[in-house]
Image (cartoon, rainbow, N blue to C red):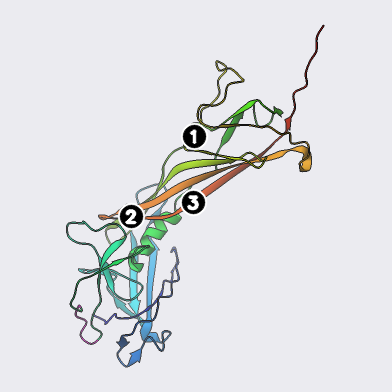
Amino acid sequence: MQALALRLLTVAAASLTMALAVTAPAHADAYGDTNCTVTPDAPQCVVTVTYTGGGNGSGGGGGGNVVCKVGGNVVDCQNGFGWLGKDGCYYGKDSGNFLPATQWIKTCLDPATGDPIPGLVIVTLFEPPAALGVITQRAVDDLTMPRPVIAANPALTAKQFVQVPVWWWVQPGWWQTKTAHASAGGLTITAKAVPRKITWYAGDGTSTVCTGPGTPWTTSVDPMAASPTCGHTYTTTSANTPGGKFTVRAVATWDVSWSGGGLSGTEPAITTTTTATVTVAEQRAVITS
């Protein structure tokens, strides 16, 4: 097997593929007569990982393929030591799967013999090893997270008034977990996006964080009652703003994770946003005799 003590990773994509590009720090070991610390762009120091197909945003995660190369020569993307990393070493888990999601057992191969270098090394990775990462990233990329479908009482299209509570919510059925899948080599990775909160920006300089979809207002509720879960009360009018309206923004935050084959991890949160404009006025007093 090709010696793999290298420090540069370029993840490329073929047709129907996803693509990543990562530059790893230079490694002190040499590949043959080439020192990858000095010449990291030398052909012997270039690792490519190509992932073709295998993505399915609605489920199933049809078969895909991952091919790893070093200097143009095909090498194992996965073996008994784990998955090929961006530094040319392999990263795996313990048989009992006791290691946290971000901790991996690192195994580097001797450049001369291809045998594992002795010694147990446990490292922390904040992203999956490169060969596994192309599959997880494809699953994450296939996630479809909709913008919030928002509603309010008084309605967003109606004039609103200071000191009158506004109820905010998203339409029923919107607050749901979204999933997508990608697979290769018998491994299927499932990516999951879970709505965690909606931050409502009222347009008057204030914001409200709601950790659920909000409560729809019904006619059985006192119009002057505040929402029990998600709402706002304006204290100033929108008369002095451009166009005489406030811009309301609802920003949904989704927690993203992936799992498969006994492995799991998290990705940065993703947000989706919906905006609307509202007119806020003062109520006029009516005097009757």
Residue drawn 41% across the image and 87% down it? 42
Q: Residue visible at 37% across and 83% down? A: 45
Mark in the foreground, 3 or 2: 3
Residue type at tag 2 = Ile
- Between the C-alphas of marks 3 and 2, the distance is 19 Å
The one of 284 and 147 positioned closer to us in this rendering: 284
Residue behind mark 3: 270
Q: What span is in magenta?
A: 112-116
Is 65 placed above or below 215 here? below
Asked where in the image residue 134 lies, by quadrant, the reply is: bottom left
- Residue position for label 1: 213
SS class of the residue under badge 2?
Answer: strand
Give yes or no for contact between labels 3 and 2 (Cβ–Cβ under 8 Å): no
Marks 1 and 2 close (CB-CB < 8 Å): no
Alpha-carbon span between mark 1 and mark 2: 28 Å
Q: Camera-side residue: 165 or 69?
A: 165
Which tag, 3 or 2, sits closer to the chain's start?
2
